[in-house]
Image (tube, grey):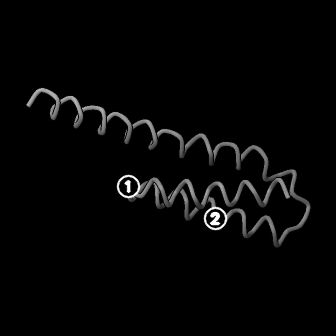
Amino acid sequence: MKKLIISIYFLLISNAALAGSCPMLWGKIDSSINNVADEDLKVKIQELRDAGKKAHSDGDHSESEKLLNEALSLISS
């Protein structure tokens, strides 16, 4: 029983840690988006950022990270 409780505790802690990375990702986007010259690309990046932030707010952190990382990859391309 003790092992089960410890396992559940670590599972909850790891989910909280993952949830904390989303704001860092959209912060990177916010600080880098002004370096993008192509206005159409900026719009696409902003849409992905907003969708990632919404997914984070809805509790879907894996989808949020996927969207935010896609936006970051567009910035660096």
In x, y percent, where is residue 55? 46, 60
In x, y percent, where is residue 71? 70, 59
Disc 1 designates what residue? 59
How far apart are the two marked residues, 1 and 2, measured between alpha carbons?
16 Å
Q: Quadrant of the C terminus?
A: bottom right
Q: Would residue 19 appear left or right of 33 to someone viewing this image?
A: left
Q: Would residue 43 appear left or right of 54 to someone viewing this image?
A: right
Residue at x 83%, y 53% (from the top left corner): 76
Q: Nearer the viewer, residue 58 or 5?
A: 5
**Quadrant hosting residue 72:** bottom right
**Quadrant hosting residue 67:** bottom right
Provide the secondary structure element on which disc 2 rests: helix
Residue at x 34%, y 33% (from the top left corner): 13
What amino acid is at disc 2?
Leu
Q: Compared to 74, does 9 lie above or below?
A: above
What amino acid is at disc 1?
Gly
Q: Nearer the viewer, residue 11 or 51?
A: 11
- Sequence-wise first label, 1 or 2: 2
Q: Would residue 55 appear left or right of 24 to someone viewing this image?
A: left
Q: Residues within 10 Å of mark 1 (few under 14, many from 20)?
A: few
Task: Tell me the number on the disc at residue 16.
Answer: none
Q: Residues within 10 Å of mark 2 (few under 14, many from 20)?
A: many
In x, y percent, where is residue 43? 74, 69
In x, y percent, where is residue 65? 55, 53
Residue at x 55%, y 43% (from the top left corner): 23
Task: Tell me the number on the disc at residue 48.
Answer: 2
Q: Would residue 21 appear left or right of 59 to someone viewing this image?
A: right
Q: Quadrant of the N terminus?
A: top left
Provide the secondary structure element on which disc 1 rests: loop
Q: Outermost residue, left direction? A: 1
Q: Nearer the viewer, residue 12 or 72?
A: 12
Residue at x 21%, y 29% (from the top left corner): 6
